[in-house]
Image (cartoon, grey):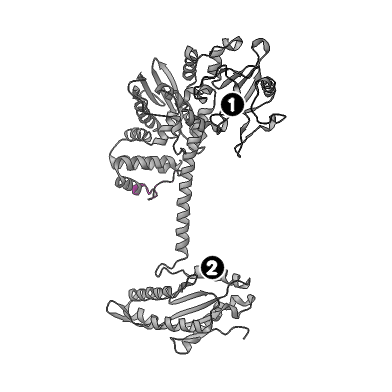
Amino acid sequence: MLGLINRSIQNFLTDTYGPDLWRQVAHRVGAPTEGYEPMLRYPDRETLGLLKAAGAELRRSRPELLEDLGAHLTTCEPVRRLLRYGGQDFAGFLYSLNELHGRARMALADLDLPELDLVEIGLGEYRLTIEAPHPGWGAVMAGLMRAMADDYGALAVIEMPTDCDMEAVHIRLLDCRHSEARGFRLSHHVGAQG
Amino acid sequence: MSGTQADRQIIEAAQDPSEMTAFPSCLGRFAPLMNALMPMFLWIDDAGRIQGLGRTLHKALDEAEVLGQPFDRFFAIGRQGHGGSLCPNARDAEGYAPRSLQPRESSGLLRAMARERAIHLTLRARPGLSLRGEAFAMPEAEGGGVVMKLSFGIYLREAVAAFNLTERDFSAADLAMEMLYLQEAKSLVMAELRALTTRLETARKEAETQALTDPLTKLPNRRAMEQALTKAIAGAAAGGAPFAVVQIDLDHFKTVNDTHGHAAGDYVLQSVARILRDALRAGDIAARMGGDEFLLMLRGRLGRDEVRALAARLIAQLEAPKWYGRSECLISGSLGAAFSQDYLPEELGQVLGDVDHATYASKEAGRGCLRFARPPSM
């Protein structure tokens, strides 16, 4: 897996639980002490090992941890901005998830995000199914969508159904304009000159 | 963005009467559709007056009153050149020197533009921003003139910043959003790669320094000295600056180690390194070649007297008692020296062997002294 993903886990653990916890986890799995290089590749088992070690250290279940990781991703401003390119409102953002895999590949060919498929199953009700080589992306997406609903100022109930064979997330969009959305201006490009 | 959603938004926006422009002729009938599909369109009549324009292009003109106004009040034909002048597109170079349009001649010029594949316009209010697009001649029966479909092309990001454009300002079929997304993602990826390259370069330099440094004394090691000598020999052989080599073998060092222990020995080696380092001029190199053997490379054309004086100073400093705790460590040094200018270019490889012999001669002569190598030609 691309180091970007391991690095995201590292940042999540460091920001949320402090550098000591990260060092313990890194020590358990034999991760590079200086951390992961986002642009280099690492074996998949290292990423899975990281999650397992973090879960054991924190005594938290994997889905819980992954949901928090998903939410944490949106606290990184460049990531939040790229996600906000998805649409003007949360409904637009939900539909844009169908293109997330392609968009990510367009930006960084090595970044293999899961294939997502959003269908509207009723008025304001959606089901997002996830196709990925490793389980767990459903929980990451649930956490990420909850945080993005807040970002867009939308009121939504986001849950992971247990009755589904595939990994899926169920979304009930109650109000697209529940509260003030956080700012997003195209011209505020990160790293833009002036 | 979601297709159906965005389309709906844009059609709604296009049907907003305030955003409609009153066109005569067929364009008038299609105004909302034109606006939805081509928010950057521009229609100019045969007299060179603006008859209609899309909402995004209107933003790019700072929402000025433009309908019925001469086209060339707002636009110049051609694109902003590097020298600050307008230059025409190569494809429409035939007779279209960049210039201001005269109302009388504009009709013919605009119609000629419509025959070209691509046109470039520059905003008079923002000379740094050029628009790219294509022009189509309208039939006389439909009002005549020229209709252009424009885009910001490579100036997209500047335009978004200058006019504070949003997703709504682009048609859903336009790749502008993807372009902006890519630019933003690309600059993040580039920043990561730059950071990675910097980290690797730092690590490489550290590794290189480590590979060339003696860990105990922090002096350059044998490998570093050999590299420097190879360079200096090649330089001297090619007529470059000469140099002198002085080898220093410590005397009685084994006794220090045996009597006072290795820690005392290490301390003595570090003291020697300090003495040698202090004796260097800029450009000179002192290296620990291994064990108790050191080598100096002194740049420039030195005479025997200068080297003799240096050797006397070094030997005095080496012989000064060194205290490791309560242990008095006494050493001295046997020195051998050679000068590159005593050798023919093809014999320079022998310098190191000869200087080693000279050092051995010092030891034979009772230690604590200097001997010069006998140059091969003498």
Image coords of residue A123 (percent x, y): 39, 14
The crowding category of the residue bearing disc 2, from other C-alpha atoms within 10 Å (few below 14, some 14 to 19, many at least 20), is: few
Q: Is residue B326 magenta?
A: no
The reply, left or right, for residue B130 in relation to residue A128 is right
Q: Nearer the viewer, mark 1 or mark 2?
A: 1
Q: Amino acid at mark 1?
A: Phe
Residue B177 point in image, percent of width and height:
50, 28
> Where does the magenta region start and end?
A27-40
Which quadrant, please, contains the N terminus of chain A?
top left
Prevailing secondary structure class for the magenta stretch in the rendered image:
loop
Spatial CA distance of label 1 from label 2 is: 65 Å
Q: Amino acid at mark 2?
A: Gln
- Residue A149 left/right relative to B226: left
N-terminal label among 1 and 2: 1
Q: Which mark is residue B227?
A: 2
Name the chain under label 2. B
State which quadrant residue A43 falls in.
top left
Q: Residue at x 33, y 43 (%)?
A: A14
